[in-house]
Image (tube, rainbow, N blue to C red):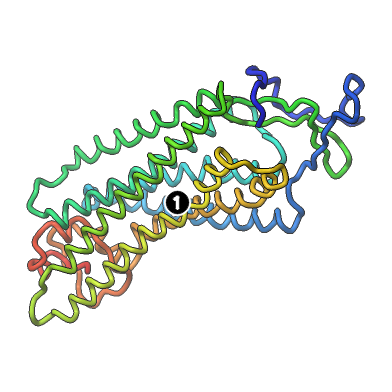
């Protein structure tokens, strides 16, 4: 995007021009015409199906998590409150991020008004930030319960305060984006549909006073929404894995306990790896756009093909979180089990780390539900 655009965008509705856009005042050589749709029909259909699948998975999975936790009072534990908040933030990602991002990736230009541009960017950024911060809170709470089981536990009240702080931080870090986002018309640039009808081209973009300011902001977002959370999650889960590997089990069940610990360590690695791989492509592209010296053809390739896939992969994280953090089988049982509820050894399913199953020393797990 070029700098120096008008700060006050015109009406961003798309009036249809049956006889073509009036171009009498501008030489034809200075006009640029782009296709209304960025992709061919087969490619567009592939994107639509892919986004529809993760949208449905996100809606069903996260709604189910919210329903289960809110309906059952005994499930309103600290960890479950964090998982509920994760589900809410992921629902917002599905509602506000996936549809608008899909449309923006399919159509050349911005098809909505200025208010939608600002609100969509703010809600999207807040939802993603809150989702990531909640993943960190879950990792820290697991760390407290497993590595330091005798320390004072986080109360439900403190957990709710933590959730409020998470959303406040999400709002704070996304305010600059909401302030600078605006819709502007691309001068001398038009879209043409299959019937050869032309439309003015509008863009929703962050109108920073200087290009360097956007680079700084992108770097701040990268460090606070990806790099720092990733480092904390990896450190917390590494400490948990080390604690589990060092913990002795009852002599009669050493072999079974060893297998369960191995599954837990494997799950922790998968959680951290999944988060890393889900968001890495999108952040890499954002940094590439701001810091790389891309040619026009390279920029077109990145924008039209790489970004839709990177967005899809990041959104898939929100769709898969209900399965990872509140899935069926042993995972769900350990998530839902209150203190004193026994998880039988014959239960099948994923391995899970519920806070209640780890509130006592490892030697007492036969009484307090063995989730590993």
The answer to which quarter of the image holds residue 223 is top left
Residue pictured at 16% horizontal, 42% vertical = 155
The answer to which quarter of the image holds residue 349 is bottom left
Residue 85 shows in the view: no
Q: Residues within 10 Å of mark 1 (few under 14, many from 20)?
A: many
Give the x, y percent position of residue 276: 42, 55
Residue pictured at 82% horizontal, 34% vertical = 32
Residue pictured at 34% horizontal, 30% vertical = 168
Above or below for 167 versus 347: above
Q: Nearer the viewer, residue 247 or 62?
A: 247
Quarter of the image with the N terminus is: top right
Helix, strand or loop for disc 1: helix
Quarter of the image with the C terminus is: bottom left
Q: Is residue 79 left or right of residue 24?
A: left
The answer to which quarter of the image holds residue 366 is bottom left
Above or below for 64 versus 101: below
Residue 343 shows in the view: yes
Q: Nearer the viewer, residue 35 or 6?
A: 6
- Residue receiving disc 1: 318
Q: Nearer the viewer, residue 193 or 271?
A: 271
């Amino acid at each position: 995007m070029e700098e120096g655009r008008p700060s006050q965008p015109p009406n961003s509705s798309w009036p249809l021009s049956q006889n073509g856009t009036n171009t009498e005042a501008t030489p034809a050589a200075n006009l640029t015409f782009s296709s209304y749709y960025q992709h061919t029909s087969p490619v567009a259909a592939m994107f639509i199906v892919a986004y529809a699948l993760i949208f449905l998975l996100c809606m069903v999975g996260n709604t189910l998590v919210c329903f289960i936790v809110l309906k059952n009072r005994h499930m309103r534990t600290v960890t479950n409150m964090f998982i509920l908040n994760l589900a809410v933030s992921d629902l917002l990602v599905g509602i506000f991020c996936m549809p608008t991002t899909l449309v923006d990736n399919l159509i050349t230009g911005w098809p909505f008004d200025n208010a939608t541009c600002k609100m969509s960017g703010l809600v999207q950024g807040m939802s993603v930030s809150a989702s990531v911060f909640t993943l960190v809170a879950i990792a820290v709470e697991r760390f407290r319960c497993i590595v330091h089981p005798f320390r004072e536990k986080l109360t439900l009240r403190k957990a709710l305060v933590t959730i409020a702080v998470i959303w406040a931080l999400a709002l704070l870090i996304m305010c600059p984006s909401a302030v600078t986002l605006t819709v502007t018309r691309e001068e001398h640039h038009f879209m043409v549909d299959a019937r050869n009808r032309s439309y003015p081209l509008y863009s929703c973009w962050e109108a920073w006073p200087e290009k360097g300011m956007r680079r700084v902001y992108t770097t701040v977002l990268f460090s606070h929404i990806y790099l720092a959370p990733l480092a904390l999650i990896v450190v917390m889960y590494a400490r948990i894995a080390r604690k589990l590997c060092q913990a002795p089990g009852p002599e009669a069940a050493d072999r079974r306990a060893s297998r369960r610990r191995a599954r837990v360590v494997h799950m922790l690695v998968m959680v951290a790896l999944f988060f890393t791989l889900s968001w890495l492509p999108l952040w890499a592209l954002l940094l590439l756009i701001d810091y790389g010296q891309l040619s026009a053809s390279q920029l077109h390739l990145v924008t039209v093909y790489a970004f839709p896939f990177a967005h899809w992969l990041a959104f898939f994280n929100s769709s898969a979180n209900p399965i990872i953090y509140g899935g069926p089988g042993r995972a769900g049982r350990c998530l839902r089990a209150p203190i004193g509820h026994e998880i039988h050894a014959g239960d099948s399913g994923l391995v899970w780390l519920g806070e209640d199953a780890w509130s006592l020393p490892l030697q007492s797990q036969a009484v307090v539900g063995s989730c590993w």
